Every structure is written in C-alpha cells, then in structure tokens.
Amino acid sequence: MCRRIQCRFLIVVLIPFSFYAQNTSALRDSINRYSYADFLQMKKTLGIEQENRPGPSGNPNDPNSANFDESQVHEYSLPSLLTTQSGMEVNSVADWENHRRPELIAAFESEMYGAVPDDIPSISWTIKSEKDTVIGGIPIREQHLIGTVDNSRYPKLRVAIEALLGIPKKSNDKAVPVVIQFGFLNSPFGKVEEPRSFFISPFEPGFKQQLAHQGWAYAVLDVSSIQADYGAGLDAGIIGLVNQGQSRTPKQWGALRAWGWGASKLVDYFDTRTDLDSKRVAVEGTSRYGKAALVAMAFDKRISLGFIGSSGAGGASLLRRNFGEMLENLASPAEYHWFAGNFLKYAGIKTVNDLPVDAHQLIALCAPRPVFISAGSAKIEGQWVDAKGMFDAAVEAAPVYELYGLRGPGTTDFPFMGTALTSGELAFRQHGGGHSTGPNWSTWIAWARRYWD
Ligand code: GCU
C-alpha cells in the first residue's frame, strides 16, 4: 500500500519533471544552434574563413586547461593609457577628457563592446504593481517598474525593461541614493525570486537588508528583459528592435553594452522622481553582470559608484595576462554575443595583442568616479576570473585617477586575501567566499559612505 503510494507519487513528480527537462534541453539545443548560426554569419560578414582559436578549459584537470599558475604568466605589454594615438602625452584632466578619453571610448565601441545606436525609440516608465514589505526590520515600499520601449517602427518586437525598486519608507521625504543591481527577476526557465549565492553564509545579511539599513534604495534590473543572454536572441530584444529584426553589423552593440544602456535608462527615470537621488546611483553585478556594471559605469558619467564583482575577462581583468579565462573564450559561440561582432577578429585573424584596448583603460574611463573591484577566494571561487589580473588592471588605471588628485589601490602588491584596499577611489578586496559580491557588501557600504554621506 505504502509502496503503491510512493510509486504514484514518483510518477506524478517524475513525468512532468522529465517533460520539463526534455523541453528545457530542447530549448537549450535550439538556442545553441541559432547562436552558432549567428556567430558564423558574423564571421562571414567579417570575411574570416579560418576557425577561431578555441579558448582553454576552466577545469584545471583538463589537458587544455587555462593557466592557473602565476609562474607561467608571460610578459605582456599593455596599450598605453596616457599617450594619444597621435603620440601626445596626457598630463592634465583636460587632455584626458578632451582627447584620450574620447579616443578610448571610440576604440572600445568599435572593437569590443559596440556602440549604442543614435536612433533608439523612447521609453515610457510605469509602476506595474507595488507593495509594502519589511526587510531586516525596515519597512520598504517595493515597486515593479516597467519601461516600455516604443516599438511603433517595428511592432513585431516588444521590449519592456523590468526592475524591482525598493525604497526604505523612513526616508523623511529626502531623495535617497540607489544601487542598481544587474540581475534577473524572471528567467526563461521559470520564475526566480531572488538570486542568492550558495556561497554566502545564511548569517550574512542580504544586500537589500544592508542597503535598507543605510536608508538606501535598491533596484534589481532584469537584464534579460533588455537583451537575451545568447547569440540567438540578437535579432530580438533592444538590439533586434533597433535593427528591425535584422542581424547586427560588426560595430553594433553586444549584450553587455545593451544591459549597460538599460541601467542608463533607469537613471533617466530616477531623475524624474523626487524620492530618488539620481546623483547618487551605483551599479553592482557579479560575473557577466559585473562586466555589464563596469561597462555601464565606463560609458555613463552619471553613475556615481561601482561595485564590480568577479567580472574577470571582458570586465576588470587584463585580457593580455594569460591567466584564467582568455579572449578566445569570450569570442566563442557561447559568449561572443556580449560584444560587438568586430571582437571576433581577435580570436581568429588577429590576437589579443592587436586589440587596441585592455581592462585598465575600461576602469580608467570611470575616473574620477570611485570603483570597487571585488573577487572571491581562489580556493572557493576558482581562478577563472583572475583576481590578480583585476587588481593589476586597477593599479594600471590609477594614473588617470591621479590626474584628478585621487588615489588608486595605494599599492602595487597583490594583497593578502581579505585585505580591504579601500583608502582610495580604486578599491579592491578579495573576500573569503565564492563567485558572488555577497561577503563584500559591508566593506563596499563602508567605503561608499565616504562618498554618499
Ligand atoms: C562563464 C564565463 C565568464 C562569466 C561567467 C558568469 O564562466 O566564462 O566570463 O563571467 O560565466 O557570468 O557566470
């Protein structure tokens, strides 16, 4: 009897699960197939016939494993930060702002992240629903925001940016700072409530709670509502809408830039509200969302602070350093959609050394605005993200901050794990947890208070 019930229970549970699993894997297969077709199409447009070089494996036991040994890092030479293309030495903020910064912006746009098109249709923001809630004992007003992009030019596609905004209710009518988290509210594979890393201790207060205690607001930006996270989606989302469903040209934006653009649109909207202080907006994200947060901040001068988590290659870590993830991984069918099509060249007909830019310059584009670069423990997170490559990039970016009379990490020695280098405008800390910003929130907040109090 008991057995029969168990058996029925298993049938009820397993049959729908196996349908779900089959459908999910069929969906994955078709996404991979269409992504690959788009990848090949872009290579064709670029006239690249040869196979791209494959990236190394992230598994240290694989024969083609990435380098995880500091003694095997080759010498590399970075593209200059403070010499313009015409050979002019940059010695002042004015030279940086008027000459070198615009040149670097143009190079990042053309060769790496792509440019935001001029003719993006307007967005209208509405509050879809709102509710009162309590987080860590603090009353919060949560609003589900929708930013609907005008699609009258191409009604076949609809783009509605989603974000969850939470504002502490005890703000005494003063406009409060807000931290935009690049994340997700929905996933194509089911509803996800709030991403929570496996690596954060259950005793670590969540970021919403920590921000609420400061009286600061949070806004979780659902990146997939802006642009899907795969190549097969490039003919839809905001990229596809602007291109009216056609494929990208090689200089057009990739997903990282599109996600960053979405954050900028949220800042536009915050600017229209009296309860939020659009002069005190930070961006935060981990991994691919950490890359997106850094890209957003580099291109949008209104973003006041950054919290860039484990962003690795394509984010804060130096691409020319052969450690962990390499450019060839980024320019593969699984990740190329984060970038402009032109970026594919550097894993085929060219190499990383031909790329006119590297991560230190991306960080420097944020100057004078403070950036906190975060990583986890090598033992728990692994070394794919190359924490030292991110630290070295911050060190290399410091001269631009110094032009403004500000400070970089304050040392060129890679700090012992857990050390908070927070005395300057380029902060760095490797926490003891995994692939998350989680255990660094309190350090970030203490540092951010210097600027937001
Ligand atoms: C992969 C990818 C990384 C990325 C990470 C993530 O590991 O290679 O570049 O940061 O996924 O976003 O989780």
Image (cartoon, helix red, strand yellow):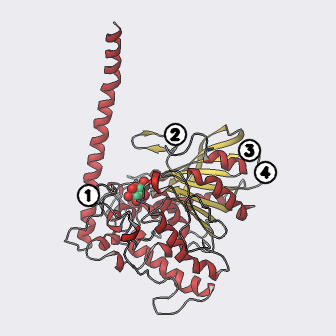
Q: Nearer the viewer, mark 2 or mark 3?
A: 2
What is the distance, in whole Å, between disc 3 and disc 4 at their CAs?
9 Å
Q: Where residue 340 sits in the image (x, y, percent)?
A: 37, 68
- Label 3 residue near ligand 1, CB within 8 Å: no
* Residue contact at pointers 3 and 1, CB within 8 angstroms: no
Density class for disc 3 (Cα within 10 Å; few <14, some 14-19, many ≥20) is some
* Residue contact at pointers 2 and 4, CB within 8 angstroms: no
Residue at which label 3 appears: 169
Which is more N-terminal, label 1 or label 3?
Answer: 1
What is the distance, in whole Å, between disc 2 and disc 3 at their CAs?
22 Å
Which is more N-terminal, label 1 or label 4?
Answer: 1
Q: What residue do we see at 74% from left, 56% from top?
A: 175
Q: Quadrant of the C terminus?
A: bottom right
Q: Secondary structure at mark 1?
A: helix
Q: Secondary structure at mark 4?
A: loop
Q: Secondary structure at mark 3?
A: loop
What is the distance, in whole Å, between disc 4 and disc 1 at their CAs?
51 Å
Amino acid type at mark 3: Lys
Q: Where residue 169 sits in the image (x, y, percent)?
A: 74, 44
Q: What residue do we see at 29% from left, 56% from top?
A: 35
| Figure quadrant, ligand 1 | bottom left
Amino acid type at mark 4: Asp
